[in-house]
Amino acid sequence: MSVYSWETSGNAHRHKKVKKTGMVVLHSDAQVDTSFERLQREVTVERRHVSRKEAQEALANPHTDTVKTALMTASTAKVLEKTLGFSSLLPCQAQCYRGIFNGRDVILHSRTGSGKTLAYALPIIERHLLVERQRATDAAPGPFLLIFVFSNDLAMQTRSVLTSIYGTQKGLRIAVAGFDDLQPVATASADEDQKKKKQKGGSSTCNGGAIDILIGTVCTLDEAIRGYTMAAKATAAEEAEAAREARLLGKKHQRFTSAKSAAAAEGEDEDEDEDDTNAVNASDNDDDEEEATAASVATRVAGVISPARVRAIVVDEVDMTLGPRFSSLGRRMKALLKFIRRANGALSEGLLNDFRAHHYVLCGATIPNWVLKAGFLGVKKYYYQLVAVGTAKLPPQLECFHQPCAWGDRVATGVRLLTQNVGFNGRVVVFGTTRQMVELEEALKTAASSSTAAAAEATIHNSKKKKAADSASLTSSSALVVRALTTEKDEAERVAAMEDFNSGVAQVLLCTDVAARGLDFVDVDTVLILNLPRYALAPDTFVHRAGRTARVGKPGRCIVLHDATEASLLDAIAKSTHVVMKALPDAVAATAAADAVASLEKSEVKEVILSMKLVVRNPFRYTKPQLKVPSAMHVLSANVDETLRLQLKDVREEDGSNGEVVLFRVPAGQLHELKQKLWKYTLQEA
């Protein structure tokens, strides 16, 4: 890996004009060594300074600022091989391992299902175990790693992944803010370390039984670190902003507000009557409740967790977790990071002279530009852009299919696809609106109950036992077990639904966009999308939805239902994400449109030929008319290979177009491949 001169600590203090800023952009490297043996060889790494005094001493004597160590313990490699079935690291994990291990600020942009959780967790935790853990410090006990996620479901999943690797054998406490007890736990090692500290009068190397890795959302971590009072103010600001947005949205739908306001007025009148009747009875209990609330607030005002030992901060699914800087969530995150920097000894004179006690790792499958310019990042950072511009944003082993379907028939079509193509679909995750998920859940339960009744009836009336058993097994295989993971469910119900699906109890999981990001469902074969996202970030949302399958190198498929009004949106999503949208196979589509297929079987099936035109405009035709640019015919010849070019018919330049437009005819089955080849240019129906 090539590095800038500012990364050589031994010479940094000698050259005053050395380059101190910059972002190293690293693209996907197919030749990266992914073996565990590479990580178990000893290498020289820089020490992370936990105080400004250490940084000044290292500057005076740079030869003492390095240490020889392996990059991964043998026990961790053994757990990855034996327990999780890893024969080596995934390419994403291997490429960014050294950069994160060295303590750089890292932005990791990688596809869904590429192993981003272990990509950031392994190097940070392994460095702590190999290098940082035995270093003495006077800081208050607390976590060395904070992981910010956007939902509690993702926090629980992240804890499960880390616990499966490290568990209790490493002596690390991993907790989720808002769910687990965050108070320190007395341990034998902690008591022994405290006794040695009192005898020698030195610093402590133990964490005192406190949390080592803390995971949570911005809200839960804020309350755990800054305390209840400050977190409550930030929460109130977010709720006020959400209320303002709701009021602005309500103005656009005034026709629905009259009935609701009338009902609300009636409800308020009833509430006022109830309040008047209960006011006297409630007054006696107000004083006791206020005293209990005050005592609770007083115990939580300072925060349970001390960030004094924080050495790494991870923001997973950064575009969703942080939010834009102008939002209340972004301001809350900025204030929380400033609080952490004050607590762990980081300075704030300025970026170039700033002392950094911790580093940041931002990761996600979609990285907007504002993430690259995040103000809390240092001026020295690595950007692992493993999804390059112009390449597919989804795994190459993912197949995408589309099926025309009217909006009112989406639920019925989904039921037919799920119940009559069990062998083709496998384990399915379905995305749609909340109303669609409720209707689909009821329809699938009805279909399952009817199939069970049919199986029982067939068993009773069948005289032969073997035939009865075969009939029952055949019918029971088509009875799907369904679970729902939507915002209508509470936290416990969503966790139970995920556990049932991942353990194999359920074959179908119905989701809204609350489960579109970050969550790793086990062995998903098919993603069924009943409605396309329609807002500005529609391609990113599609990437996260379809990315629930084809994870970690496994194959998968995505089926999209759409109507004629969504054809342009689907084409825009395909062009932005660089995926090939194929027509749903006839054998599968037959169940979704039986009548249409029956009529097609009676008639002869002919190959459909489409008339298309390729438009390549000259952007300088007015400012620099003498400048020559490639013609549309040249672009077509340069980007389309010989095999596909033979499928094109009647290729010619349009009269009077000055070579900017080429007309041709192409079979409908080859259109998706042609669009993939010419994604940079305008391809339209003639």
Image (cartoon, rainbow, N blue to C red):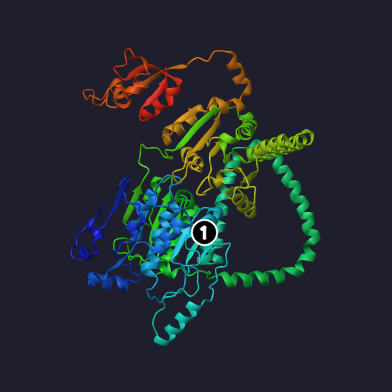
Q: Nearer the viewer, residue 299 or 403?
A: 403
Quadrant hosting residue 644: top left
Viewer can see residue 312: no
Image point 30% across, 20% down: which residue? 633
Q: Nearer the viewer, residue 374 or 631?
A: 631
Q: What element carries label 1?
A: helix
Q: How far across and down, in percent of the image, does residue 60 sit?
A: 23, 72
The quadrant of the picture occupied by the C terminus is top left
Q: Which amino acid does label 1 sit on?
A: Arg
Image point 76% across, 53% down: which residue? 271
Q: Say which residue label 1 marks.
A: 159
Q: How far across and down, in percent of the image, does residue 481 sit?
A: 65, 43
On screen, residue 298 above or below 324: below
**Farthest residue toward the right?**
277
On screen, residue 545 above or below 626: below
Image point 56% across, 66% down: which residue? 228
Viewer can see residue 227: yes
- Please give left or right for residue 565 compared with residue 340 in the image: right
Q: How far across and down, in percent of the image, does residue 614 sit?
A: 36, 21
